[in-house]
Image: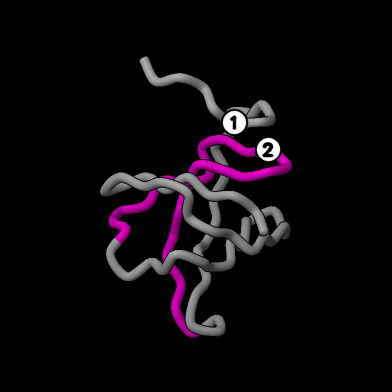
Amino acid sequence: MQEERRQTHRQRTLKGGRIVTNDGHSTFDCTVRNLSGEGAKLIVTSIIGIPQRFGLAMHDGRSFSCETIWHTETEIGVRFL
């Protein structure tokens, strides 16, 4: 089991969102699986084409500037900038 290294607890969630890149000209659908004031875990179809830094526009109207901290082929851990 992986050691927990986060500074703040993340709340489990299941919310829709979009990863926004290229000044809004490119978007990728994602699902927000957990969320805190510091960051989130995103589920995507593929990480191909998603840059290190991007915007996250959630379907509930919130938006964040993000930086990738870790990733797998279908998951991205981000911190909010």
Asked if residue 30 is positioned above or below residue 3 in the image, the reply reads below
Report the residue marked by disc 1: 6
52 magenta-colored? no
Look at 44% across and 79% down and name the residue there. 26
Discs 1, 2 touching: Cβ within 8 Å = yes
Q: Residues within 10 Å of mark 2 (few under 14, many from 20)?
A: some
Residue 55 percent across, percent down from the top left: 58, 67
Q: Residue at x 52, y 62 (%)?
A: 18
**Picture quadrant of residue 14:** top right
The picture quadrant where one finds residue 65 is bottom right
Tag nearer the camera, 1 or 2 = 1
The spot of residue 75 in percent (x, y) is: 37, 45
Q: Up-down: is 72 above or below 34?
A: below
Q: Is residue 60 left or right of residue 69?
A: right
Residue 27: % across, % down:
46, 72
Q: Is residue 27 left or right of residue 1?
A: right
Q: Secondary structure at mark 2?
A: loop
Task: Kindly identify the amino acid type of the residue bearing the numbered disc 1.
Answer: Arg
Query: Could you tell me how far apart the alpha carbons at marks 1 and 2 are, in whole angstroms?
Result: 10 Å
Quadrant of image for the C terminus:
bottom right
Q: Position of residue 79 (x, y in %)?
A: 59, 49
Q: Of helix, strand and loop, which mostly describes the magenta segment?
A: strand
Location of the N terminus (image quadrant): top left
Q: Is residue 32 magenta?
A: yes
From the viewer's perspective, tell me whether residue 5 is left or right of residue 28: right
Which circle marks residue 30 in the picture? none
Q: Looking at the picture, tell me which residue is in the foreground, 77 or 13.
A: 77
Q: Which residue is mark 2?
A: 36
Instruction: Check disc 1: other Cα within 10 Å, few if <14, some if 14-19, many if 20+.
Output: few
- Which residues are drawn in magenta? 25-47
Residue at 32% in and 58% down:
47
